[in-house]
Amino acid sequence: MKRIGLYIHIPFCLQKCAYCDFYSIPGRDEALQKRYINALTLHMKTLSTTMEDRVFDTVYIGGGTPGLLTAEMLTTLINGINDNFKLTEDAEITLETNPAVADEAKFRVMRSLGINRLSMGMQSSEESVLRTLGRLHTFDQFAETFREARRAGFENLSADVMYALPGQTVDGLLETIRSLIALSPEHISMYGLKVEENTPFGRLGGKLSLPDEDIQCEMYERACDLLETEGYHRYEISNFVKDGYESRHNLRYWQREEYLGLGPAAHSFVDGVRYSYPRDIMAYITALEQGSLTATDSLIRITPAEAEAEKIMLGLRLAEGIIATAELLKKCENYLRYGFMKRKGERIAFTTKGFLVSNTILAELLDD
Ligand code: SF4
């Protein structure tokens, strides 16, 4: 039976963060949330026959802030998954949450439903930076939420931190990472800020005071060194783990394995086709309630040439890199010679220096 992952998008947040371009609606509209969960259940029902020949070994409930959902809504959602799809015994089931939207009691419900991994937004331990980002929590609240999740029985916890932020220094970032490591998460994601146009940060344009490029590079390099020293190895450009705790769901994106995405803005890759649903929750709900969900933003059948390009683009995000053809090796000669890439047997991979300019290198490699 074919293996596949399931992504479910929960497009609700208490408030939009100043940098965030993900599709989510701010506020606490429980009636809308409930209606949305019912629509998702309907969607799963319509897909259950198509997915009969597949078994799901990862589930990722992302957003948005899925931790906002009530225990009752989470129960309906997980029951919907179990009623309509086959899951492996050891399926990795991740849920994203933020500090102060879930407490120990809700975490216990999540564990009892089979959710076995949490990914939490921390972003920084510096209160001034958190305020600039528009985050609704302090570092102490993050730490308390993290401990509550542990007490509820979660043995696989991940946290996100960010670098290249307005007002952040190299020392501030390293202090953030040390504070996080003190809590002993199994997995750490570290993302550089990308200023997206349609966000409050994007609208500030040149008025946003960011660390310059050299400082941003120093931040990434020194944070990677610190994480490695503390036993977190980098397995992907932005992701670090204690041995054995790689995110199995995220690995499938980089290894081009299949995933089914449900919800507005969710992407799927099934049977060699990539498609997504529009960023419009009401259109999604209404279509499902009327039994006519067909609209997609994009529907692309990947050609063999595109598949090869994807293998390079996605595979080189991984620290283990990819098996290189003779042609690719030839193209990478200079990157290998000047230390942007390294070679181990048949595999090539970026070095830290290479990861810092990986977008430029990939654009050159995939130019023709
Ligand atoms: S909580 Fe997460 S998804 Fe919601 S606005 Fe902030 S960064 Fe975006």
Image: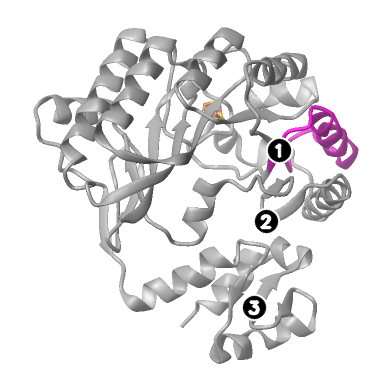
Which of pointers 3 and 1 lies earlier in the amino acid sequence?
1
- Kindly report the distance in space between the C-alpha atoms of the residues bearing marks 1 and 2: 13 Å
Mark 2, residues whose alpha carbon is within 10 Å: few (<14), some, or many (≥20)?
some
Between disc 1 and disc 2, the foreground one is 1
Kindly identify the amino acid type of the residue bearing the numbered disc 3.
Arg
Count of marks placed on residues: 3
User: Residue 128: x, y in percent?
Assistant: 78, 22
Kindly identify the amino acid type of the residue bearing the numbered disc 2.
Tyr
- Kindly report the distance in space between the C-alpha atoms of the residues bearing marks 3 and 2: 15 Å
Which of pointers 1 and 2 lies earlier in the amino acid sequence?
1
Badge number at residue 186: 1
- Look at the numbered disc 1 and give the secondary structure of its residue: loop
Q: Ligand 1 closer than 8 Å to the CB at disc 1?
A: no
Q: In which quarter of the image is residue 26?
A: top left
- Look at the numbered disc 3 and give the secondary structure of its residue: strand
- Kindly report the distance in space between the C-alpha atoms of the residues bearing marks 3 and 1: 27 Å
Mark 1, residues whose alpha carbon is within 10 Å: few (<14), some, or many (≥20)?
many
The residue where tag 3 is placed is 347
Residue, x 10% and y 35% (percent of image)? Answer: 292
Q: Quadrant of ligand 1?
A: top right
**In the image, residue 174 lies in the stretch drawn in magenta:** yes
Kindly identify the amino acid type of the residue bearing the numbered disc 1.
Glu
In the figure, is residue 161 to the left or right of 22? right
In the figure, is residue 213 to the left or right of 49? right
**In the image, residue 179 lies in the stretch drawn in magenta:** yes
User: Residue 77: x, y in percent?
Assistant: 34, 23
> Which stretch is magenta?
163-189
User: Residue 240: x, y in percent?
Assistant: 71, 48
The residue where tag 2 is placed is 235
Q: Do the residues labelled 1 and 2 touch (CB within 8 Å)?
A: no
Closer-to-camera residue (352/4): 4
